[in-house]
Amino acid sequence: MKPSAGYIALSLLYCAVVGSLCFPRNAWALESTDGQVSGQSLEDIIERYIRTHPEVIEQSLQGLENKRAAEEQQRQKAALTSHQPELLNDPDSPVSGNPNGDVTVIEFFDYRCGYCKRAASALTELQHLDAGVRVVYKDFPILGEPSELASKAALASHLQGKHQAFHEALLAIKDELTKEQLFRAAKATGMDIERLDRDMNRPEWQAVIEKNRRLAKTLGISGTPAFIVGTELVPGALDLKMLQDLVSQKRGR
């Protein structure tokens, strides 16, 4: 059973009062006759301390939260370092920009994600402005079956050499991503619709999606978009300046 907030606060205060603050046992004149502080006396000490120093609760909980955040950041950095080969060189992940670029930007995205759509133009512009940038796309459909369908269609478009154009077309769609919308976008990018219809049903695309989901879970990615440059993971819709700063930081190391 999950401990209550009150129990956690009481436990933290116990550590603060009895351990960190090191009050003498007679500070509150609550010793028992044999010189030992009773369980009831300890509760009295904690209760009186809470009443006179309520800010200790907030400080203790904030300290615990900061510690956990720092530990999670260290864990995430280690995971990003150990999984570089999967992030950078997975043959199942489409690549755009300069395939031999000196800096790689990796994006976990969902074609139905509004924030992914917002960031799409910035990522495209980054590739136009910076000839040294390589982009790796990690299909991470988290918004239901239409998202999965769009990812499978995009992965299949790679077989016709149209992934980048189709990828950008899908992210530009404002309406719901139906199969009809997918085919309309495919036609606009010059794809063979009948071939796409066959290819997007190939079972390997589901395997690619599941692989990306496992990797995202390992890295602590739960939403889209999420951008990775080196061992820096930044969630959310980044604008062009933010992306350029990440690339510059990587080059400056």
Image (spheres, helix red, strand yellow):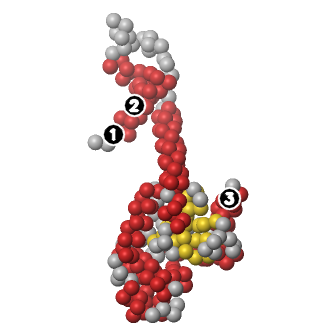
36 or 172: which is nearer to us? 172
Q: Position of residue 184 (x, y in %)?
A: 45, 91
Give the residue drawn at x 49%, y 35%: 60
194 or 170: which is nearer to us? 194
Residue identified by numbered label 3: 249
Within 10 Å of the Cα at label 1, are there few (<14), some (14-19), or many (20+) other Cα atoms?
few
Within 10 Å of the Cα at label 2, are there few (<14), some (14-19), or many (20+) other Cα atoms?
few
Q: Which numbered disc, 2 or 1, marks the residue that appears first in the sequence?
A: 1
Q: Position of residue 177 (x, y in %)?
A: 42, 82
Above or below: residue 221 compared with residue 130? above
Q: Which numbered disc covers residue 107?
A: none
Which residue is the extreme one toward the left? Answer: 1
Give the residue drawn at x 49%, y 68%: 90
Within 10 Å of the Cα at label 3, are there few (<14), some (14-19), or many (20+) other Cα atoms?
few
Helix, strand or loop under label 2: helix
Residue identified by numbered label 1: 3
